[in-house]
Amino acid sequence: MKIYLLSLLICILFIDCRQKNRQPVFNSQTADTVKTFPVNNFILSDIKDVQQTPYLIYKITITNKKKDSSVITKEEYKNLADQFLQKDISVPSLKILYKESVFHDLTTRSYTITYTATDPSLYVKDLSVLLNDETNKLSRIFIHCLNDNGDSTIIEQYSWKAGKSFSINKYIRRKDGSEWEEEKIVIWNDPV
């Protein structure tokens, strides 16, 4: 009986040791469970609202500190708003290249969800979403982009104010030291 128990114990230890030496197998086809905030869905909702509501839409353009303003069509509004949609980082091939962080800002009474590029070569450097901490409704979206193409550096900053307005800022610094700056502010439901 002792020999039988001893043999059984040796078999269990042998099997246990073999299991510990095995390398874990990772399935590269696992389902993507990481969610990013649906920024494009929200922007599309605002675009649809503007397309269906008779808002007075106007644009303020400031180029190298010279200011101009004009009423714009819904088509021009849509063309400008589409620039935000082109910065979508939620596609699976891109979102894995961004690190998410969440911050509760007591001063602005909002939660800020920020997606920061982990690869310095990515065009969209970061995207931030501000949510009201009481209602969890989106209040602002900020997108920062950078492109260094050798002869110049292009910095773009996009800001979307929920249901009211958005702005697109572009700044170009050339190797020769010259600079160019433009800000476009589009307003449809936000008294100035």
Image (tube, rainbow, N blue to C red):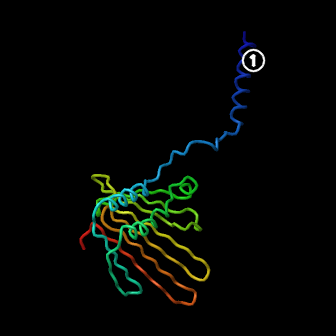
Residue at position x 37%, y 66% in the image: 160
Local SS, label 1: helix
Residue 50 placement (x, y as % from top left): 33, 62
- Rendered view: 70 above or below 12: below
Assign the C terminus to one quadrant of the image: bottom left
Using the image, determine if residue 181 lies above or below residue 25: below
Q: Residue furthest left?
A: 191
Give percent across and percent down for residue 32. Answer: 54, 45
| Residue displayed at 31% across by 75% down | 71
Which residue is most to the top? 1
Q: Quadrant of the N terminus?
A: top right
In this image, 72 relative to 83: left or right?
A: left
The kind of residue tagged 1 is Ser
Image location (x, y in percent) of residue 22: 71, 36
Q: Quadrant of residue 8?
A: top right
| Location of residue 29 by image quarter | top right
3 or 116: which is nearer to us? 116
Disc tally is 1
Identify which residue is drawn at 50% across, 48% down. Answer: 34
Left or right: 56 as drawn, with respect to 174: left
Residue at (37%, 82%) from the top-left corner?
62
- Crowd around label 1: few <14 · some 14–19 · many ≥20 (10 Å): few
Along the line of sight, the residue nearer the viewer: 77 or 133: 77
Camera-side residue: 20 or 38?
38
For disc 1, the marked residue is: 7
In the displayed structure, would residue 174 be above or below residue 149? below
Coordinates of residue 119 in the picture (x, y in percent)? 58, 64
